[in-house]
Image (spheres, rainbow, N blue to C red):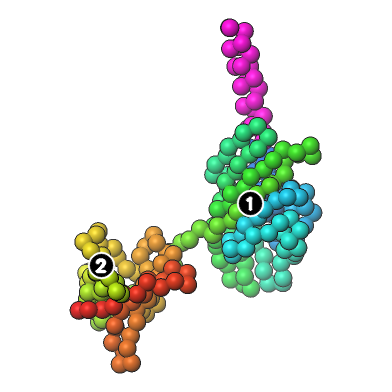
């Protein structure tokens, strides 16, 4: 019995460094793939993508290896940048590994610099020729847009009570300390920041925009909560 336990402990100790090495190796491969994007080094992606890979991209498309390799082309003149890989989570089960990365992108766009972060979930399989990526999914991390200050006279135009179209829930908007504050059916009040005149967002929830609607005379008659291409309509009742 003691020999069995000792053997299991030795196997566990032997496996731990191997898993650690695999973690570092897969992270290195992911960084190499990121570095290959700007110069369009397709050979790197060809090396690490499994023939049966399924890859879902941030634009909502998904594709296999052949279609992915066609996208690895040099960036056009005026575009450049870097992507730094950050490993967030890793789990290995035998010859299969799941690795979650954050891609920290700095992009130089015709003389201007922009930044973006992406969550990339990957699944890797250890083949005879080494680790191959069999699945990948990229999600753009959303961040709040820059907010602008609107005069109190304009904020006052939005104040009032709104009712969800064809339903009972209400939203109350008021101006407090120079900010537009919304409260829905007694829930915790939330500050609405202006992205542009008549367009607002709640900090920490950049997926949804509050877009005010006006009539022919310019009076606010309601707003829509827009998530991507879908609108939820609220009508001003007071």
Q: Secondary structure at mark 1?
A: strand
Q: Left or right: where does residue 237 sit relative to residue 83?
A: left
Percent position of residue 125, x then y: 69, 40
Which of 178/21 is in front?
21
User: Image height check: is 177 above or below 13?
Assistant: below
- Disc on the earlier residue, 2 or 1: 1
Q: Residue at x 58, y 71 (%)?
A: 112
Percent position of residue 9, x then y: 60, 16
Residue 169's disc number: 2
Q: Residue at x 67, y 69 (%)?
A: 79
* Furthest residue toward bottom: 217
Percent position of residue 99, x then y: 60, 43
The quadrant the N terminus occupies is: top right
Visible in this render: residue 171?
no
Quadrant in the rendering for residue 18: top right
Q: Is residue 8 magenta?
A: yes
Residue 152's disc number: none
Residue 136's disc number: 1
In space, the residues marked 2 and 1 are separated at their CA atoms by 41 Å
Quadrant in the rendering for residue 173: bottom left
The magenta-colored residue range is 1-22
State if disc 1 and disc 2 touch (CB < 8 Å).
no
Q: Is residue 122 magenta?
A: no
* Furthest residue toward front: 166
């Amino acid at each position: 019995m003691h020999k069995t336990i000792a053997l299991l402990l030795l196997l566990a100790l032997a496996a731990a460094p191997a898993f650690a090495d695999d973690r570092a190796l897969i992270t290195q491969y992911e960084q190499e793939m990121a570095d290959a994007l700007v110069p369009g080094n397709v050979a790197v992606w060809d090396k690490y993508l499994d023939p049966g890979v399924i890859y879902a991209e941030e634009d909502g498309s998904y594709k296999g290896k052949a279609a992915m390799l066609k996208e690895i082309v040099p960036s056009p003149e005026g575009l450049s940048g870097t992507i730094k890989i950050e490993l967030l989570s890793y789990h290995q089960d035998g010859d299969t590994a799941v690795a979650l990365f954050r891609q920290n992108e700095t992009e130089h766009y015709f003389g201007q610099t922009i930044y973006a972060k992406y969550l990339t979930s990957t699944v890797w399989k250890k083949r005879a020729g080494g680790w191959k990526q069999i699945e990948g999914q990229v999600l753009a991390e959303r961040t709040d847009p820059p907010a602008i200050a609107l005069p109190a006279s304009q904020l006052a135009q939005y104040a009032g009570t709104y009712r969800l179209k064809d339903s009972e829930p209400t939203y109350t908007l008021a101006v407090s300390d120079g900010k537009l504050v919304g409260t829905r059916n007694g829930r915790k009040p939330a500050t609405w920041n202006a992205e542009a005149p008549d367009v607002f967002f709640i900090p920490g929830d950049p997926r949804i925009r509050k877009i005010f609607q006006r009539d022919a005379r310019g009076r606010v008659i309601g707003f829509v909560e827009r998530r991507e291409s879908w609108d939820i309509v609220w009508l001003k009742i007071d």
